[in-house]
Amino acid sequence: MSYDRRRFIRATGVLASAIAFGTVGCKSENKKEESKAEEPATTPKDESLNEFGIQLYTVRDDLPKDPKGVLKQLAADGYKQVESFEGSKGIFWGMTNTEFKKYMDQLGMVIVSSHCDINKDFDKKAAQAAEIGMKYLIAPWIGPQKTVDDYKKFASKFNSCGEICKKNNIRFAYHNHDYSFKDFNGQFPQDIIMQNTNPEIVDFEMDIYWVVTAGADPIAWLQKYPNRFRLGHLKDRKKNADPKDTDASCDLGKGMIDFSKVLRVGRDNGMQYYIVEQERYDNSTPLKSAQVDAEYLKTLTI
C-alpha cells in the first residue's frame, strides 16, 4: 500500500501421518487364516476457496466516486467478503455502519474487517464494527522503527487495542509490510511484535507479497507462529522483478508466488480469511484486475 494510505491510518508439525494398522484374523475351524490389509496413509484433499474477500484499497481510485456501484461490481465478480480501509469518507464510505451492512446484505456480501487509524476514536470504531458483526479491526502500518523498544511500544499499543476489541467481542490484528521481515540489529521486527503481543487478543494479517518482497519465506513464518496469522493478503509479485522493486504487484496467477502451496500451509496453521489486495495494474484497470483476481481464486485449490 502507498504512503498516502499509510497516513490514514516451530516450525511446527507438518500434518501427522496416518497410522497403519495390520491385523491378523483368528483361525477358523478349517484352519484358514484371514488377515486385514494395512490401511493406506491418508493426505488432506485439495480444497477450493469457498469464500474469498477483497481489500477495498485495490479499487481505491474508483471507490470514492461510486461506493455502491463499485461494491455491486465486486459482488458480481464473485467476492463474498470485503475488507475496508479508512479513507476520506471513513470506513463505511459515506454510509453509517448499519447502512453499509444493509447494502452488504443486499449484495450477498459480508464486511469482515477494516484497516483503520488506531490512534483516533478506536473505542468508537470497535463499537461500530461490533454492531454490524465485523470480525476484525486492523492496524495497517507502523513504519520502520529506530529501536527494539520502539517496536515493543507498538506491541503494547496493539495489546491495548486487543483489549478494546475483546470488550466488543471482535478481534484486533496487525498487517505487515516488508520492513517487518528485514534484519534489524540481529532480530526481525515481526518476531519482536509477535513475541510481545498477547496471542489471546492480537492476531496478524500476513501480507504474503510483502513477506516475499523482503526476501523471507511465508511458509516458514506460518509454521513458526501457528494460529496467529488468521488473515492473509493475496497479492502476487511480478516474475523476475528487481529485488529492490517494492512496487511490483500484478494480477494473481501472473507472478512468482505459489498461492496454492502457501495458502494450504496457511489453512493448516489457522488462516481463516483470504483477501485480495492489488496495488499496480499494468495494461489494466483496478476493477478489471479485481475481476481477473476473482476468476483466478475460483479455480485455486489449496
Image (cartoon, helix red, strand yellow):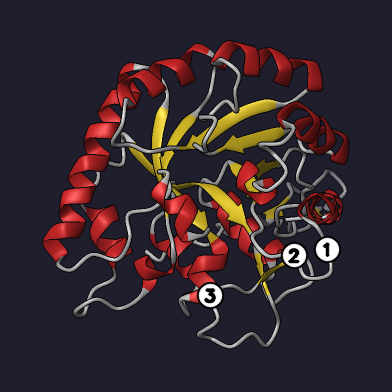
Q: Are marks 3 and 1 in contact (CB under 8 Å)?
A: no
What is the x, y in percent for residue 156? 18, 44
Q: In this rendering, is residue 237 above or below 33? A: below
Quarter of image, res 144:
bottom left
Which residue is nearer to you in this view: 243 or 199?
243
Q: Residues within 10 Å of mark 1 (few under 14, many from 20)?
A: few
Q: Gap in Å between the C-alphas at discs 2 and 3?
A: 14 Å
From mark 2 to mark 1, how far is it between C-alphas? 5 Å
- Measured as percent of width and height from the top left, residue 284 is found at 83, 63
Task: Say which of 289 and 239 sits in front.
Answer: 289
Tell me the number on the disc at residue 246.
Answer: 3
Tell me the amino acid under the disc marked 2.
Tyr
Residue 245's place in the image compared with 252, above or below, is: below
Amino acid residing under circle 1: Ser
Say what secondary structure mark 3 lies in: loop
Question: Can I make out residue 287 in this image?
Answer: yes
In the image, taking residue 40 as reference, residue 151 lies left or right, namely: left
For the C terminus, the image quarter is bottom right
**Residue, disc 1:** 284
Q: Amino acid at mark 3?
A: Thr
Residue 12, given in percent of the width and then of the height, sits at 43, 61
Q: Tell me the CA gap for discs 3 and 1.
A: 19 Å
Q: Identify the secondary structure beneath mark 2.
A: loop
Name the residue tied to disc 2: 281
| Label 3 Cα neighbours within 10 Å, binned few <14 / some 14-19 / many ≥20 | some
Residue 205 position (above or below residue 187): above
